[in-house]
Amino acid sequence: MLDTTTRNIKYLPGVGEQRATLLNRELNIHSLYDLLYYFPYKYIDRSRVFKVAELGGHLQHVQLVGEIRSFEEMGEGASRRLVGHFTDGTAFVDLVWFRGIKFVKNKLQLNKKYVVFGKPSMFNGRVNIAHPDVDDASMLQLNEMGLQPYYNTTEKMKRSGLNSNAMFKLVQNLFQLLDGKLPETLSQELITKHGLMPLDEALRVIHFPKNNKELQAAQYRLKFEELFYIQLNILHYSRDRQKRYVGHRFSKVGDMFNRFYHENLPFELTGAQKRVIKEIRHDVNGNSQMNRLLQGDVGSGKTLVALLSMLLAKDNGYQACMLVPTEILAEQHCATLKRMLGSLPVRVELLTGSTKQKERNVIFQDLESGAIDILVGTHAILEDNVVFCNLGFVVIDEQHRFGVVQRAKMWAKNNIPPHVLVMTATPIPRTLAMTLYGDLDVSVIDELPPGRKPITTTHIFRNRTDSLYTFIRRQIDEGRQAYVVYPLIKENEKLDLKNLEDGYNQLCNIFCDYRLSKLHGKMKPKEKDEEMRRFASGETQILVSTTVIEVGVDVPNASVMVIENAERFGLSQLHQLRGRVGRGASQSYCVLVTEYKISEDTRKRMEIMTGTNDGFEIAEADLKLRGPGDMEGTQQSGIAFDLKIANLARDEQLLQYVREVARTIVDGDSECSNPANRILWERLRTIKNMRNRNWGAIS
């Protein structure tokens, strides 16, 4: 049987060097296997032929059989188009091409029978089909055609003739090359027990379905397998890590924890905080290294949970550290911990890239001697010359800012890896958490501490900004501060940066009696830190910024968040930005500003944002609206993956189901030695090898 994983795509008939380069760059298709698993994104029923006389703008897609009687070129410049007058004897329809006019005229002949397929629409009272698929009528086989697959292609590919139809023909060529059935990738026991279609049949049906029933069975088989191997990988990795890494045992709740809890606690813990602390306490009292993800909205009290956990380490003779993504956030965390600890004999120090060498030398010396109990810092902590006496607990704030390699560096700071608590204020839907963070135990703080008021969120159109500015002025006069955020989207950085600069200058004129700060990612780190410091200290009243403040500092006095061009942000990002306010006791506001004309998708996002402050509800809605996005490289085990056919928003039940199937296999075959599961473990190894393969070596 031909090995599709090692055969370079350029050797497939119809591809060659030039098309192979396009497929590599545009779709990441390097091998025959990649094409085999490049699935259609939709299917259209082509089993029926319509009459031209039946057409109207109300039909989705139609198939016609007839002849082009004449061509006519119309318009000039950008509006130039080629019109083919097509008929089947019942009426005429206009076939219209705006691109590739010369190619179309050379390819298509007058008065020859063709099959035409496309979406009809009305223009100036006439029915037309723009850029239809046109094939020789002798190719029409209604009984066998079934559902027509459609493949996603890029504009660059289309310009080179690699449209959906061309991709379909390449897939046909691929199946003609295969000399026999494709080998199975699941055990017969799993196939029988879960009623799955065999792999060979599923792959043929997914590309050439005859009807919806068999298509659904093929999709189910391929989704099951895709999600099953992701979960098998995560659960096996997690089980292996638990066996391999013994953890420090924190056997007692000691003096520092108890004194802080009874004397220094700023407010009564919420039920969610108490539950999470119990979960952490249970983990660190065992024999395995803790690896826990703590999710909670901005202001839910994650830092307090982290401090109580670090005090457990102190009481058991261990040091702790907190790793954060930015210097200003590190400074703020350090100040917060010191303030909360008060006069308790717990030494907290700060280490960042800006720490002076003289101070560094003292910190290095006291870390190694054990005189420092808690170290707060940025990536500077990861350097080899930062040596702990006995590191037992690591808190990582905003995990997505730190890669797997960086996390492993923290593990190496002790001969026994420290317990790890990963904190994020980015709520992750359960299905995504099970997939991205499947090797971590997940804790959730889903209650706000007492006294926190929900943020009032409103959506306004740009023509109402005068009343918005009046409102901001009133808030500042009451002693509050405001953020005004502009988008900075990479595709159009120059234009976006100009919008920020123009917006800043305009606001300086409008609020000429106040002081403003400006912040964006193109500024030098020292400049950014200085502007942020001025705003945090109250020297400036308005901070005009890009999304660099998304994971930023705590300014309790800031009560207004204005998000300009809110239509250009996703739900999760809007929610993160909103979380910059609402940190003090006063009522806070978020104002979403958009153009008057917005899409249906934007309108839904605005309604969701104004309707709820619940980050998890918003994250679920975002997943449904946008999909999981590109998850490449985010899996905690460091093994990248992407989804070819499953959809985490729609396939939640299937994901939970296959996770239990995978868990049963891992629990019953922890050494991967059961002959009945040999095909599963071999397939998992193959998937990993394919990820790591150097595609330049494909022959």
Image (tube, rainbow, N blue to C red):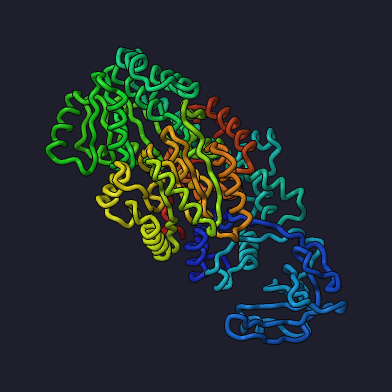
Q: Can the viewer see residue 680?
A: no
Q: Nearer the viewer, residue 29 or 85?
A: 85
- Which image quarter: residue 281? top left
Q: Is residue 190 left or right of residue 579?
A: right
Q: Nearer the viewer, residue 426 or 85?
A: 426
Percent coordinates x, y for residue 546 in the rendering: 40, 53
Q: Nearer the viewer, residue 657 or 5?
A: 657
**Going by the picture, which residue comes out furthest to the right?**
90
Residue ID at (78%, 64%): 59
Q: Can the viewer see residue 55?
A: yes
Residue ID at (42%, 35%): 583
- 82, above or below 152, in the image: below
- Which image quarter: residue 476? top left
Q: How many marks?
A: 0
Percent coordinates x, y for residue 8 in the rendering: 50, 61
- 524, above or below 457, in the image: below
Residue ID at (61%, 40%): 186
Percent coordinates x, y for residue 222 in the rendering: 63, 45
Q: Nearer the viewer, residue 302 or 48?
A: 302
Percent coordinates x, y for residue 88 in the rendering: 84, 77
- 659, above or below 18, in the image: above
